[in-house]
DNA sequence: GCTGTTTCTGCATGATTGTGCCTATAAAAA
DNA sequence: TTTTTATAGGCACAATCATGCAGAAACAGC
């Protein structure tokens, strides 16, 4: 067996009789677990069978749940299990409602900038599978969800990682964001009121959000009702920078009236 | 193996009297345990009986649980047992051993660059709580672990996220890494051998690892023994760029001797 | 010895499986 | 976008298989 790892070319050279199906699948499994990834093309050369056969093997192994089949080869199963459990998210039901509304704002081909926070993560989970778009974020939790989506391109903003908020913060991240021009930006909102606009408590997070707002053609704030008409010490922006406010409430709710009057679209 | 293709001719030539049934079956068992697999066709030639008879023998032995019958022949019982355990991380025990050894190389205040992969994640989990250092990585899984550590500063390299390998890849990431100068760099190794050095299968990952190696004062390769003396299509670097090789084996293991001779420190 | 029974084996048949090749479609890459 | 590459599904062919059957061999009892 080890020989196959060492001298795959020799197999061809000696024209060794082809492996039995089970044997071959075992070998494939070993390779995929060893290297985390295999290509149909190289396996085909190593084992000296057609790519069709390899593809059929990968198909079977995939159906048995022993590996994950992807275009061009397969990935190890144990490798792709970095999931954050979604237990005990505060006000989850409201956040799902908000996420549902917000998703309607995204269409194919869009370049989308998102912050962090549980509402954003909820939105990431609910993105329709057929959506094709590019998502940019500095939030680890959000990125994890985006990665599971089949059709979206994921760009991660790098810099120092803030352990509290699980997002990347710092001048590097801000200057990266400044270089972008997104179609739309989704911000989880910690506090919003008429006098102070959108406010937050963490200076570095505020800097980042400011940059995100400046870099986006359209700014969407996601806020559950209990955060409306509250404020925090540091201002992110005044209300006139906000294009759309998404809450779990009906857009006609009297609580939201002043925001509509301020020129914000409600959803 | 090849002998069995040759021998049967002699058997025919000498017109050896056919074996008794019991005798034949124990011969088959011996062969299957010796080679892990037998083909009905070659057994038929070797023993000089029809394939039907062999098939019936294999059938019986299979029912007695002494081997596993497959299309075209049979496999040894031990063969399939090797590949059943697929839960969790492959070779986790070995990886933990490697991680333990590798951690000894890190001291307070260091600036550490790490790749992705399960071995690196294992290492991240085992970092002592009192260690104070800065860790830089583009691997989402590794970053998640680093974030849980109380005393380390985490820097995330941003760029496009590769869904397969769960790391950030691309020119942006590479140019970020080039701007760094790390004290030490830990690389999970997919394949390493004497001729080709360290090799991998994914072009973009290779570019990234190359940059990491160039940006580090000391390069450490983490590799489980199975990956030693194997190679993949794309070269990351030749052996002389590697300072330290960490495996689960004893540094004195004869398998590692050539690497020590190549000037690599073993751990 | 003879005879009937059982076991083993080889052969013929048709069904099943494994594989490679082909083409239209779908997905990635340029 | 266009171009390249990978894939699914159908087809063809060969290898392998299950089954039934018949002859050969082994065996038992007489």
Image (tube, coloured by chain):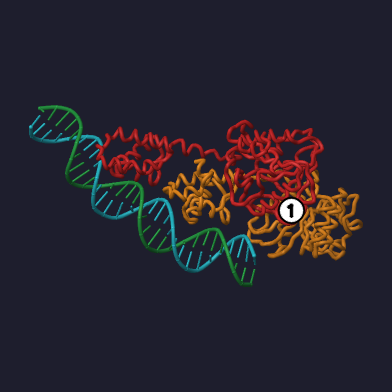
Chain colours: A orange, B red, C cyan, D green
Q: Quadrant of residue B62?
A: top left
The C terminus of chain B - image quarter: top right
| Side of A8 relative to D1 (left or right) | left
Q: Does residue A61 appear to the left or right of B6 in the view shown?
A: right
Q: Quadrant of residue A72?
A: bottom right
In this view of the protein, can residue B42 be seen by the observer? Answer: yes
Residue A252 visible from this viewpoint = no
Q: In front here: B238 or A72?
A: B238
Q: Is residue A68 shown above or below B126?
A: below
Secondary structure at numbered mark 1: helix
Q: Residue at x 60, y 43 (%)?
A: B194
Give the residue number, with chain letter if any, for mark 1: B174
Q: Residues within 10 Å of mark 1 (few under 14, many from 20)?
A: many
Residue in front for this viewpoint, A160 or B227: B227
Badge 1 sits on which subunit? B
Instruction: Specify the quadrant of the image occupied by residue C22.
Output: bottom left
Of residues A35 and C12, the one drawn nearer to the viewer in this rendering: A35
Q: Residue at x 63, y 40 (%)?
A: B223
Q: In the rendered image of this protein, does residue A85 appear above or below residue A261?
A: above
Residue A20 at x, y = what percent? 43, 46
* Whole-percent x, y for residue A181 in the image: 79, 63
| Horizontal arrangement in the rendering, residue B194 relative to residue A218 (left or right) | left
């Amino acid at each position: 067996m080890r020989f196959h790892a060492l001298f795959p070319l020799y197999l061809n050279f000696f024209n060794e009789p082809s492996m039995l199906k089970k044997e071959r699948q075992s070998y494939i499994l070993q390779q995929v677990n060893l290297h985390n990834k295999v290509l149909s093309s190289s396996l085909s050369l190593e084992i000296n069978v057609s790519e069709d056969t390899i593809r059929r093997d990968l198909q079977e192994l995939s159906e048995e749940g022993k590996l994950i089949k992807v275009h061009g080869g397969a990935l190890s199963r144990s490798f792709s299990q970095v999931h954050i459990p979604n237990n005990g998210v505060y006000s989850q039901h409201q956040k799902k409602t908000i996420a549902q509304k917000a998703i309607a704002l995204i269409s194919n081909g869009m370049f989308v900038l998102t912050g962090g926070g549980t509402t954003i993560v909820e939105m990431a989970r609910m993105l329709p599978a057929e959506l094709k778009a590019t998502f940019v974020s500095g939030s680890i939790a959000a990125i994890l969800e985006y990665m599971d989506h089949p059709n979206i391109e994921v760009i991660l903003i790098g810099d120092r990682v803030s352990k509290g908020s699980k997002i990347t913060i710092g001048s590097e991240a801000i200057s990266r964001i400044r270089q972008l021009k997104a179609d739309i930006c989704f911000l989880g909102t910690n506090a919003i009121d008429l006098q102070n606009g959108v406010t937050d408590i963490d200076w570095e997070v505020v800097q980042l959000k400011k940059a995100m707002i400046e870099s986006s053609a359209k700014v969407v704030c996601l806020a559950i009702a209990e955060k409306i008409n509250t404020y925090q010490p540091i201002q992110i922006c005044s209300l006139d920078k906000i294009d759309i406010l998404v809450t779990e409430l009906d857009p006609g709710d009297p609580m939201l009236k002043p925001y509509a009057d301020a020129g914000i679209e409600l959803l």
